Image (cartoon, grey):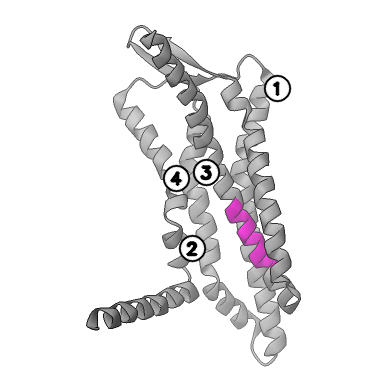
Amino acid sequence: MMLLSNRTTVHISCLSIEYLLKVLPTIGDWLNACVAIERAVAVSRGFRFNKNESKRMAKKIVILLIIMNMVSGIHDPVNRSLTDDPQDQRTWCVASFRHSSLLNIYNTTIIMINYITPFGINLISAIIIIIKSTGLKSTATQSMNPGHILKQQLKAHKHLIVSALTLVLLALPRLIISFINVCVKSREVSYLNLTGYFISFLPSTLIFFIFVIPSTGYTNAFKIFMKRFTSSIRSMLSR
């Protein structure tokens, strides 16, 4: 009875944990893409940008994104099961799509869409922001050389391109592991795969280093905040 209970627990963990580990990072990537779209729209519309309307839309889009990602990935736990390995005396949590070529194509398509599309949105949004900012600056200061203005805007918004490239590079190990359909028995290779898997979660934990540090404006704002914070702490301690 205990053995049956343990196997049931392992099976539930196999279905739920693997599913969440695939879906949650993808949701994070799409949310980052939505932030990039909002930035591009805000720059494009300028004073016509409605912040309150953007907040209302953001709530709906976040819910829609979560539902869409969870539904699009539901095929994974449905086709995942426990496989016993009598030779090594261990149990594998395996997802198999080989019984259906259409399902295999669908799985590959979903993985590629979730990898390429958010990166493309981030990069295109960064380019739009740079181009629009250059156009606005050129209109305001017609005496300046447009090429010089473009260089200034590239320097000012380089963090957007750096962030987009960083996100896609950190997500690359997760993409590679998603297409590995064999059970790895070598301990060294297992550790390598595990390391690559954890690297793909870095964007969620290193938001400060990916988005704040590369930006001069954000970094200066952070320094000002820290100065005010330390001043408040010192004044409290000196009382």
Label 1: which residue?
102
Q: Amino acid at mark 2?
A: Phe
**How many C-alpha atoms fall within 10 Å of the one at disc 1: few (<14), some, or many (≥20)?**
few
Pointer 3 with pointer 2, Cβ within 8 A: no
Label 3: which residue?
25
Task: Measure how far apart labels 1 and 2 are at the Cα level.
Answer: 39 Å
Residue 35 belongs to the span the image colors magenta:
yes
Q: Secondary structure at mark 4?
A: loop
**How many C-alpha atoms fall within 10 Å of the one at disc 4: few (<14), some, or many (≥20)?**
some
Among numbered discs 1 and 4, the one appearing first in the sequence = 1
Magenta stretch, residue numbers: 31-41
Quarter holding the C terminus? Answer: bottom left
Pointer 4 with pointer 3, Cβ within 8 A: yes
The residue lying toward the viewer, choosing from 207 and 3, is: 3
Q: Amino acid at mark 4?
A: Phe
Pointer 1 with pointer 4, Cβ within 8 A: no
Task: Kindly report which numbered mark, 1 or 4, lies closer to the viewer in this rendering.
Answer: 4
Secondary structure mostly taken by the magenta-highlighted segment of the chain: helix
Query: Residue 27 at x, y = what percent?
Result: 58, 45
Task: Measure how far apart labels 1 and 4 are at the Cα level.
Answer: 29 Å
Residue depicted at x 64% and y 56%? 34
Quarter holding the N terminus? Answer: top left
In terms of image quadrants, where is residue 23?
Answer: top right
Residue 54 in the figure: left or right of residue 151: right
